[in-house]
Image (spheres, grey):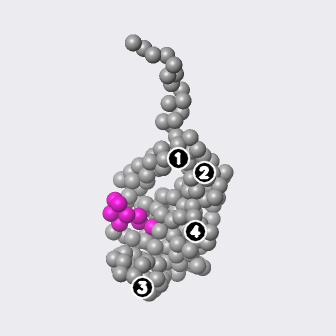
Amino acid sequence: MDTNSPIGFEQFYGVYRGISPTDESPIAIGELEASLTQEGLKLRHATGLEIQEHMFKASEILPMTHDEVKSCYIEGSDYTDRTKGYKFGVVKLLFMPDANNSEFGLCIRDMGMADFLGPTILYNPAQVKKGLHRKALMKLKFISGRAGFPTLKAGGKLEENIIFKIINGLNFRKRIY
């Protein structure tokens, strides 16, 4: 067991994928990847202009108490008992190990201005393997329309919705009878 990681943290190692708020995107969100290893947590965020990366050492990540986790949810929430929490500084990592397909495996809270813009939510590695992240990105790209959606694949920049590229390429003036 890695002595630098908090107790129990190793059960959450893997790559999480989801979305996080950004003021550099026309739809105010961009793709986020969180990689958890024995070294710590690495975040990669597609902002709309670039990929921002941040690394937090495992030794900086501390387990949260049940009361600290409980304070992150509205009173009476059944998520409290299903969540395992960790923190670094004021930032909270809320893992839900038994997340089903309609829930998120990781929620990151108290990231300053980002929390005012929207949630930072990610699918856990098992959900990513099932394709839930890919399906969610496809929906977000469609919703974003012509503006596009910032992805890591596009270097953090806007990736235009392919459906609008196809529609724009069609010539509706010519009719075939």
Q: Which residue is denoted by mark 4 in the rendering?
A: 116
Q: CA distance from mark 3 to mark 2?
A: 37 Å
* Residue at x 39%, y 82% (from the top left corner): 75
Inspect this view and state whether residue 45 appears.
Answer: no
Graded by Cα atoms within 10 Å as few (under 14), some (14 to 19) or many (20 or more), the crowding at tag 1 reads some
The residue labelled by disc 2 is 26
Q: Are marks 1 and 2 in contact (CB under 8 Å)?
A: yes
Characterize the magenta stretch by its predominant secondary structure: loop
The Cα–Cα distance between marks 4 and 1, rounded to whole angstroms, is 20 Å
Query: Hey, which quadrant is residue 40 in on the image?
Result: bottom right
Are discs 2 and 4 less than 8 Å apart at CB? no
Residue situated in front as seen by the camera: 111 or 164: 164
Residue 101: x %, y % from top left = 34, 59
Give the labeled residue for mark 1: 144
Question: Which is more N-terminal, label 4 or label 2?
Answer: 2
Q: Are marks 1 and 3 in contact (CB under 8 Å)?
A: no
Pick whichever of labels 4 and 3 is earlier in the sequence: 3
Residue 66 got which mark?
3
Q: Quadrant of residue 102?
A: bottom left
User: Which element is circle 1 on?
Assistant: helix
> Is label 4 in contact with label 3 (beta carbons under 8 Å)?
no
Which label number is shown at residue 19?
none
Q: Amino acid at mark 2?
A: Pro
Amino acid type for the residue under numbered disc 1: Ser
Q: Which residues are magenta?
A: 99-106
| Residue type at numbered disc 4 | Phe
Decide which of tag 1 and tag 2 comes sooner along the chain.
Answer: 2
Q: Is residue 101 magenta?
A: yes
Quick one: SS at disc 3? helix
Q: Amino acid at mark 3?
A: His
